[in-house]
Image (cartoon, helix red, strand yellow):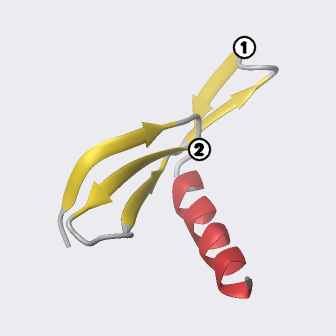
Amino acid sequence: MDMKNFIYEGKAKKVFATDVDGVVIVDYKDDATAFNGEKKGTIVGKGAINNRMTNYVFQQL
């Protein structure tokens, strides 16, 4: 599966199309914000944890 076009970027993730219909690649970021965006930083591993949590929730649906 190859990553194709960029679709969306939000505060926590980037979404890319693939060469497989109906399948996307989600790249979770390690960025963190606080106080309505006034304080910004990076938490190493945050994106990986968010990915695992999302995977778990979708498996439960």
Question: Residue lying furthest right in this view?
Answer: 35
- Residue 58 in the image: x percent, y percent? 66, 77
Residue where numbered disc 2 is placed: 43
Q: CA distance from mark 2 to mark 1?
A: 16 Å
Picture quarter with the N terminus = bottom left
Q: Is residue 10 depicted above or below 36 in this figure?
A: below
Residue at the extreme bottom: 60
Image point (72%, 13%), residue name: 38
Q: How many marks?
A: 2
| Residue 60 coordinates in the image, percent (x, y) | 73, 86
Of all residues shown, which one is farthest toward the top?
38
Residue displayed at 38% across by 63% down: 24
- Above/below status of 38 relative to 54: above
The amino acid at mark 1 is: Glu
Which secondary structure lies at badge 2?
Answer: loop
Residue bearing the label numbered 1: 38
Front residue of this view, candidates 7 and 41: 7
Q: Amino acid at mark 2?
A: Ile
Residue 39 in percent (x, y) is at: 70, 19
Q: Secondary structure at mark 1?
A: loop
Tag 2–tag 1 contact (CB < 8 Å)? no
Tell me: 31 left or right of 26: right
Which quarter of the image is occupied by the C terminus?
Answer: bottom right
